[in-house]
Amino acid sequence: MGSQEVLGHAARLASSGLLLQITLRVLDTEVIFICCWDAEGSHSVNEVLFRLITFVLNAFILRFLSKEIVGVVNVRLTLLYSTTLFLAREAFRRACLSGGTQRDWSQTLNLLWLTVPLGVFWSLFLGWIWLQLLEVPDPNVVPHYATGVVLFGLSAVVELLGEPFWVLAQAHMFVKLKVIAESLSVILKSVLTAFLVLWLPHWGLYIFSLAQLFYTTVLVLCYVIYFTKLLGSPESTKLQTLPVSRITDLLPNITRNGAFINWKEAKLTWSFFKQSFLKQILTEGERYVMTFLNVLNFGDQGVYDIVNNLGSLVARLIFQPIEESFYIFFAKVLERGKDATLQKQEDVAVAAAVLESLLKLALLAGLTITVFGFAYSQLALDIYGGTMLSSGSGPVLLRSYCLYVLLLAINGVTECFTFAAMSKEEVDRYNFVMLALSSSFLVLSYLLTRWCGSVGFILANCFNMGIRITQSLCFIHRYYRRSPHRPLAGLHLSPVLLGTFALSGGVTAVSEVFLCCEQGWPARLAHIAVGAFCLGATLGTAFLTETKLIHFLRTQLGVPRRTDKMT
């Protein structure tokens, strides 16, 4: 397959949305929009509709809550739930899914059932820490905190009861089961939460605790009922591939050779646990800093968590599919670890042209979000969550996040090339640097939040992302140093376009001062109209000045659509 064919395939993935995943955590719910196209081109419309309904319900729920309750649920209790699950099952999942389907499944299932007593232990231990060692919220503001801790810990244990069923389904590629189970449990949880918030708002954390327990119960029941029906129908074709024939085979039992578990898998589980423990701390670093170091009050924690996830929505929607698709392109076109002068020059030239266009596209998209996000953050938060989000620190947080999105866009493109072109040794060194940066991020987050509040988390992320971009740019510069290609030229914009961005930013900022957001909806609509006019002018200027990028978009992201129609 030539470089042009690979490029066309990557463009088709990016433009048609072969993999589009939006992870939006609103309240304590992880809302996942997945739109997957299979080989025949069909897609799960029902899944998108389910998640869209959930998104709307959560926006409705926010208008009936205090930001303190949101903070306790989103940060404190959700961290208890996720930490319990991680400590009890993450390493088991990785170990039991890494060996393929040909194994003694009785021993694997026995090993997975050990997650339940581990979950009980960790939920009790962490629950004691959450109740005895951490700051307890004011019961007049956030009632029933102790009950919330108990029920969130219990919900983690209930979810672990379905772990053997989940691993078996994953190992045998029961994708539809996972989608249906998660969709159904998430939407029922959101409906229950909305109903309780509307009719019994004085219940406080009872609402979210019961909804969380309901969610995990429905999730586990979906798997249990599915396998019960599947194993009870002998005519099912899937039975031929399953290692169990009765539902009781999924329960703990002594195997034929007398060994309860496979000790090789058990040792692998311990290895995975040691590897992933630090990753968990870094992944949930912000929440651990907020929970254990008391850098923010519960209200600020709630606002930050919502704004953070709203801001990440755009990055995951626009940039993630491009990054994933073109990583495949670079990995197939370039030879890993080889200098550009030692490779096929046609492939090197195509890769350089694509990288330049992607950098330009990321820069333009990021600048557009940053410039227009500054003037429309308050309005967006007011529409989504009401005054709880649009007043106070919310708008400042979202404006800061818009700058972070610009850095995310550039980093996604530079790293997708860097990881595709680096040698294994270079990747190992790069990962070590990333580990050091992530560790320093926790320290920097603590210091900056002490200095400037919740914005400090975003500033720390910007600093971290800036270092990563610098490293990737240095690698790209060295990679193409001896060749005639200069893909980093994609980071240069014409002065006319930069002037248009600056003018649009100034006009929309003035429009926000006079039209948003206290003058009512006519003034808001006028503010939106001003933004639409400025956006149109900016895009028109980009169309006239960035002709090379427009040609790339037309020839690469346009051709797949016409080809699909012809086929």
Image (tube, grey):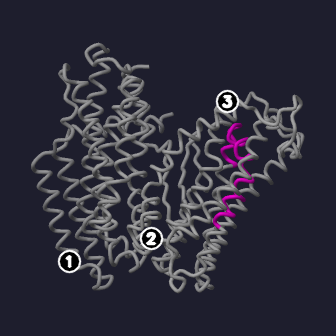
Q: Residue at x 36, y 22 (%)?
A: 334
The CA span between labels 2 and 3 is 41 Å
Binning the other alpha carbons within 10 Å of mark 2 as few (below 14), some (14 to 19) or many (20 upward) gives: many
Any magenta on residue 380? Answer: no
Q: Residue at x 29, y 57 (%)?
A: 459
**Amino acid at dot 3:** Gly
Binning the other alpha carbons within 10 Å of mark 3 as few (below 14), some (14 to 19) or many (20 upward) gives: few
**Amino acid at dot 2:** Gly
- The residue that mark 3 highlights is 99
The x, y position of residue 264, in whole percent, is 70, 29
**Amino acid at dot 1:** Val
105 or 117, nearer to the observer: 117
Q: Which residues are magenta?
A: 152-177
- The residue that mark 1 highlights is 513
Left or right: 328 in relation to 539: right
What element does badge 3 sit on? Answer: loop
What element does badge 1 sit on? Answer: helix
- The residue that mark 2 highlights is 302
Is 475 situated above or below 34?
A: above
Question: First in sequence: mark 3 or mark 1?
Answer: 3
Front label number (3 vs 1): 3
378 or 494, nearer to the observer: 378
Left or right: 480 in relation to 378: left
The CA span between labels 3 and 1 is 60 Å
The CA span between labels 2 and 1 is 27 Å
